[in-house]
Image (tube, rainbow, N blue to C red):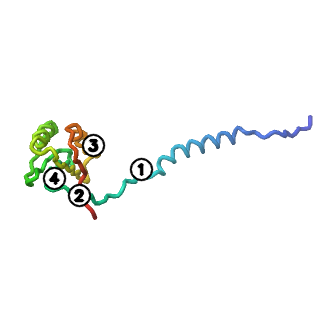
Amino acid sequence: MRPRRLKNEINVVPYIDVMLVLLVIFMVATPMMQTGSVDLPSTGKSSAVPENPYRVMVKADGSIAVQDARGKEKSIDRRQLNDLLATELEANPELPVLVVGDKAARYDAVLEVLDQIKLQNIKRVGLETVRK
């Protein structure tokens, strides 16, 4: 029987397997550790609050309602918004428009309304917020 020789080499295959498993675990766990919150700027007070603004309200279900300068409110369709804004703009070229988004409304619904208002070339547009 021959004497057994000792190997001076380290078998690195198990270490590579462990490192790959750890890499996969960190790749999966890292996105879960992020909170997903967005730091939004705080609201400030406008230098000049518009008098009798025309309000476009986006409700929680995505429907739209408008409130004219006299306080009369009515629900409208998105297609009717352009026509209403055009007629109001003819009567008052410096028409101030406030977009009021419900807290539960989708962000893209509010942005779509802002885009529609922007297409009408209205100069005075703002977002109405509530201070706590």
Q: Earlier in the sequence, mark 2 or mark 3?
A: 2
Dot placed on the residue nearer the N-terminal end, 1 or 4: 1
Residue matched to label 4: 53
Quarter residue 122 falls in: top left
Task: Name the residue carrying label 2.
Answer: 48
Expressed as whole percent of the image width and height from the top left, the position of residue 59 reads 19, 49
Q: Amino acid at mark 3?
A: Leu
Q: Where does label 3 land, which residue?
A: 111
**Among numbered discs 3 and 4, the one appearing first in the sequence:** 4
- Residue 25, picture quadrant: top right
Disc 4 to disc 2: CB gap under 8 Å: no
Type of the residue with mark 1: Gly
Image coords of residue 62 (percent x, y): 21, 45
The amino acid type, in three-letter code, at marker 4 is: Pro
Horizontal side of residue 77 vs 37, given as left or right: left
In the displayed structure image, the side of residue 19 where residue 128 appears, left or right? left
Real-space Cα separation, disc 2 to disc 3, in angstroms: 24 Å
Lateral position of residue 37 relative to residue 22, left or right = left
User: Taking 132 as reference, is 39 above or below it?
Assistant: above
Residue at 69% from the left image edge and 42% from the top image edge: 15
Which residue carries the number 1 mark? Answer: 36
Q: In terms of depth relative to the viewer, which is nearer, 125 or 94?
A: 94
Circle 2 or circle 3, nearest the eye: 2
Marks 4 and 2, how far apart at CA: 12 Å
Mark in front: 3 vs 1: 3
Q: In the rendered structure, which disc, 4 or 2, sits on the residue that comes first in sequence?
A: 2
